[in-house]
Image (spheres, rainbow, N blue to C red):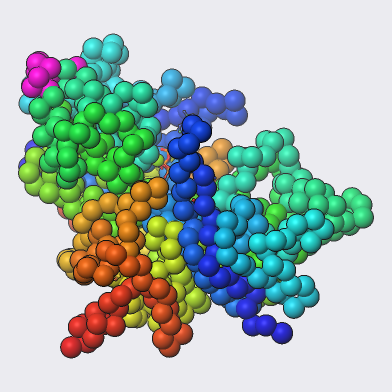
Amino acid sequence: MTPLIEVENLTLQFRTDEGLITAVEDVSFTLMKGEVMGLVGESGSGKSVTAKSLMHLNARNAVYSPESRITLHTDTGTVDVLSLRTPRELNVVRGGAISMIFQEPMASFAPAITIGKQMVEQLLLHSDMSKGTAKSVSVEMLDRVGISDATRRFDQYAFELSGGMRQRAMIAMALSTNPSLLIADEPTTALDVTIQAQVIDLMKDLVSEFGMGIIFITHDLGVVAQTADRVNVMYLGRIVEEGPVREVIRNPRHPYTQGLIAALPKLEDLDAPLTPVPGDIPSPLERPAGCVFNTRCSQVVGEECMALVPMNCRLDETHSVACHIYREAAE
Amino acid sequence: MSRSLIQASGLSVHFPIGSGLFVKQLLKAVDNVSIEIEKGSFFGLVGESGSGKTTLGRALLKAVPISAGTAHYDDGEVAYDLQELDGAELKDYRTRAQLIFQDPYAALSPRMTVRDIIAEPLEVMGLTKGRAETDERVREIAARCRLNLEHLRRFPHAFSGGQRQRISIARALVSGPKFVVADESVAALDVSIQADVLNLLKQLQDELGLTFMFISHDLSVVAHTCDHVAVMYLGRLIETAPTRKLFEAPRHPYTKALFSAIPSLDPDDDKTAQKLAGEIPSPTDQPPGCKFQTRCPHAIDICRSQEPALETEDGHDVACHRWKELMNLVAA
Ligand SMILES: Nc1ncnc2c1ncn2[C@@H]1O[C@H](COP(=O)(O)OP(=O)(O)OP(=O)(O)O)[C@@H](O)[C@H]1O
Ligand SMILES: Nc1ncnc2c1ncn2[C@@H]1O[C@H](COP(=O)(O)OP(=O)(O)OP(=O)(O)O)[C@@H](O)[C@H]1O
Ligand code: SF4
Ligand code: SF4
Ligand SMILES: [Mg+2]
Ligand SMILES: [Mg+2]
């Protein structure tokens, strides 16, 4: 397998009135071609910000640390994403090699332009297709994602579609440029579970058909279990555990992942009490020193948890965890 | 004394929509819903987005006009017919029935302290004699929601999700309500925090003798917290039963599909969810007959012409022409 995108030591802060907020800290991962990677974590843990960095798409007040590096491998060569500056350079990644599906599909369609027109414009921007070809590619794509009567839908506005249909149109638009990486940011959160099941099936089909890499962001572990090959668990801007989905869900090693899975209400056992992870998530302004999870961890091993940021420990070739409990395993 | 706190019969909420003089369409957000909520219960309401859950909750709080039908409230101290409630009685009802907002801060000034946010309902409704009494009641409810004096002096933006949700709960409970509607109260919370807020709600229910209507799209959460569940589809109540009965043996084809579509935590669980084709119809363009007939794999002629009524058997209600036949099919 060949790597599609490599993220190394990504650290990202935002300048705000209250000072510098660290949103992502020392995040590294590699996504292989054709792989589906889940990114889970609590609200505010930095999932969306990480994803947007891959397209160099964060707000103006974002500050990347000098060590941060994102390398995209395309058919035509290697791109150092964070060094891109001009709109022309950025177009190579944004909507070109990388497409993103947002949580709220209304946000990604301009309200006053028809769905078809937006799809065509995007294709014209990212390819040398003629207008006629762009139109037929778009209609075909709408049809591919299961939108019936695609020719008519092509001329409709986003607000005229139901939630599920809009999400499909969004996926069609994201796929029409034939990206090598698709980022799906909570693509099913706003949907009814019966519609969510349809969208998940659709995305699985598309991976096997188009073979692109996917980063699937969600807070729903069930959705990750059903879609991803590997998963990264984030907490307060850091990746705390990383591994194959089966491994991480069946045999979680980081105390946060363990707590998260134990806290999930299980349908198999309605009598089981709900067991929360004690305490609240600290505000980004009060990031704990040492391990970011130390304010809530029930397995603290000693002073090092309060003082030292735990290094990434490899448990085996594919599963790693950032926690002092496993330090010896790594040595 | 009646066992039910709320008893609604044929309740409807219709919104007139569209502009122009003659094109007045009716959006039937809640249509002909009959529902009974027992005192002290934790009553769950589920259904897809737009099915009318929030509107039903708001109708029972008298926060949207009731277009047709009746809703009776009886807490043992007072009894009201909600469809005709107004004046001093409505004012009194507002202290007895409250909503926990998902995020009340959107509507509040960022310069209000947590104390001010919790105290506002008391001040607006004039429920206390002065600042001292207000402070006393705020402190009391805040303590029950695990907020201390230090928290009360601060501003809400400085709080995390779980704490903010506890502030919303304290604000809803400060007037001493008997009936509380919690609309997606844990939807935005991390799973590791969610369980804590759910446990708190259950504890408060117990300590304060509250009756909850708990609106959620998360079926696993509902299964774990509610003693009774109602399922809505396109403004209709299609099934309601004690939680265990509903999850063990759902009767309505939509409920069955809903349950089987919950993504399993087991990556190898390839349960072929009874995948439903098609989209949920628009509420302004509803199909005739059963509202689920456009997506139901079991629809037959009668489903397309006649709307099924809610049938009760063994304390389990369902609105489907074929439920018995379909249950027997599974059993056979
Ligand atoms: N433009 C910005 N300015 C300041 N802070 C920001 C900005 N964008 C994001 N943040 C902060 O960065 C952190 C990470 O945000 P991010 O949106 O990545 O979280 P998330 O994991 O995607 O959460 P959610 O599940 O709620 O979508 C948060 O604390 C957020 O408030
Ligand atoms: N004030 C209003 N005027 C017109 N239509 C409304 C109004 N309030 C709600 N609706 C419509 O009524 C229907 C039911 O909405 P409601 O908010 O009750 O659904 P819900 O089940 O709570 O959905 P969700 O899960 O998305 O919160 C929707 O079609 C909605 O657009
Ligand atoms: S490093 Fe220490 S505080 Fe952090 S998760 Fe591991 S044991 Fe807990
Ligand atoms: S009444 Fe008919 S269409 Fe409706 S749920 Fe029952 S079988 Fe399906
Ligand atoms: Mg996000
Ligand atoms: Mg709602």
Relative placement, left or right, of B102 versus A63 is right
Query: In x, y percent, where is residue B311?
Result: 41, 79
Give the x, y percent position of residue A55.
28, 27
Numbered range of the magenta stretch: A125-134
Please tell me in which quadrant of the rendered image residue A171 appears: top left
* Closer to the camera in the image, A303 or A282: A282
Residue occupying image coordinates x 27% and y 48% = A38
User: Quadrant where the N terminus of chain B lies?
Assistant: bottom right
Image: A161 above or below B143 = above
Q: Is residue A310 visible?
A: no
For the point 33% across and 80% down, which residue is it?
B249
Q: Nearer the viewer, residue A2 or A136?
A: A136
Question: Height in image: A245 above or below A187?
Answer: below
Q: Residue A104 in the image: x percent, y percent?
A: 37, 39
Majority secondary structure in the magenta region: helix
Query: Count the marks: how many?
Result: 0
Does residue A209 appear in this view? yes
Asked if the stretch drawn in magenta spans residue A127, the answer is yes
Residue located 39% across and 61% down the image: B233
